[in-house]
Image: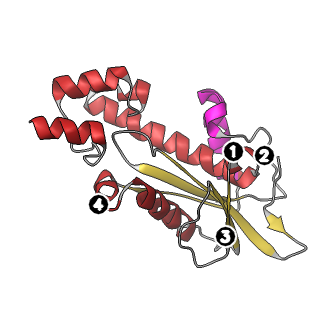
Amino acid sequence: MESIGFDFSAGQLIAGVDEVGRGPLVGNVVAAAVILDPNKPISGLADSKKLSEKKRNLLYTEIKEKALAWCVASASPQEIDEINILHASMLAMKRAVEGLKIPPEFVYVDGNRCPDLTCPSEAVVKGDSKIAEISAASILAKVDRDHEMTLLDKDYPEYGFAKHKGYPTAVHFAALNKHGPLPEHRRSFKPVRELLETI
C-alpha cells in the first residue's frame, strides 16, 4: 500500500478522507480525514471492512496517537433526508477535512467524486485499499460509527443495532415493522418512508 503523508519533494501535506454509513437506514453518515506522520509509520493499515473489530480498534488508537492530524465528522439523519445521502456524505467529508488542525495541501478522497474543498483533491476508487491515509480515515470513521450504533442499541435494544449497525437486514426490518421508526431513522430511505406512509 502506498503511504503518502508528507511529500518532501513536492512540499505537500497530504490527507486521506473516507466515509462510512451510506447504506444504513438509521444514524449519521460519518467521515474521517487523516494526515499521517512519515516518521511514525503504522503497519497493518487496510480497508476497515477487511479488518477484524479487534484489529480496527487497535489501529484506531495507534492512528490517533501517531497521525500528524485527524478529524472525525458527520452528517445527521435530518441532513441526509434534506439533501440526500450522496450530498450528506460529501458534507461529512468536507467537515472532516476542514476540522483538521493542520490544513492539508492536497486530499485523496475514497470513491469517484470529491467534496467541495478549498485545496486540490483527487478521488481514488477503492482508495481505502490503495492509499494508507484513506485506510486510516476509513478505520476512524468505521470505529466511531460502530460506537454510535452501540450507544443507540443501549437506548433501543429491541432493534439490534449493535449487531447489524443499522444496515437493512432481516432483523432490522422485523424490528422496524414491529416497533416503528425512531427519530434517528432516515425517513427519506425507501423502507422507512414506506412504513411511515402506512402509519
- Residue segment shown in magenta: 48-65
Residue 7 sits in which quadrant?
A: bottom right
Q: Are marks 1 and 3 in contact (CB under 8 Å)?
A: no
Q: Nearer the viewer, mark 1 or mark 3?
A: 3
Q: Nearer the viewer, mark 4 or mark 1?
A: 4
Disc 4 marks which residue? 82
Disc 2 marks which residue? 42
Q: Is residue 175 above or below residue 87?
A: above
Q: Secondary structure at mark 1?
A: helix
4 or 3: tag closer to the N-terminus: 4
- Point out residue 155 in the picture as x, y percentages from the top left corner: 26, 33
Most frequent secondary structure within the magenta stretch = helix
Residue 53 is inside the magenta segment:
yes
Q: Secondary structure at mark 4?
A: helix
At a point 61% along the width and 43% down the height, the residue shown is 139
Three-letter code, disc 3 = Ser
Q: Nearer the viewer, residue 70 or 160?
A: 160
Picture disc at residue 121 = 3
- Point out residue 56 in the picture as x, y percentages from the top left corner: 63, 35
2 or 4: tag closer to the N-terminus: 2
At a point 18% along the width and 35% down the height, the residue shown is 195
Q: Secondary structure at mark 2?
A: loop
Q: Are marks 2 and 4 in contact (CB under 8 Å)?
A: no
- Point out residue 23 in the picture as x, y percentages from the top left corner: 44, 41
Say left or right for 135 vs 114. right
1 or 2: tag closer to the N-terminus: 2
Q: Secondary structure at mark 3?
A: strand
Disc 1 marks which residue? 62
At a point 18% along the width and 22% down the height, the residue shown is 178
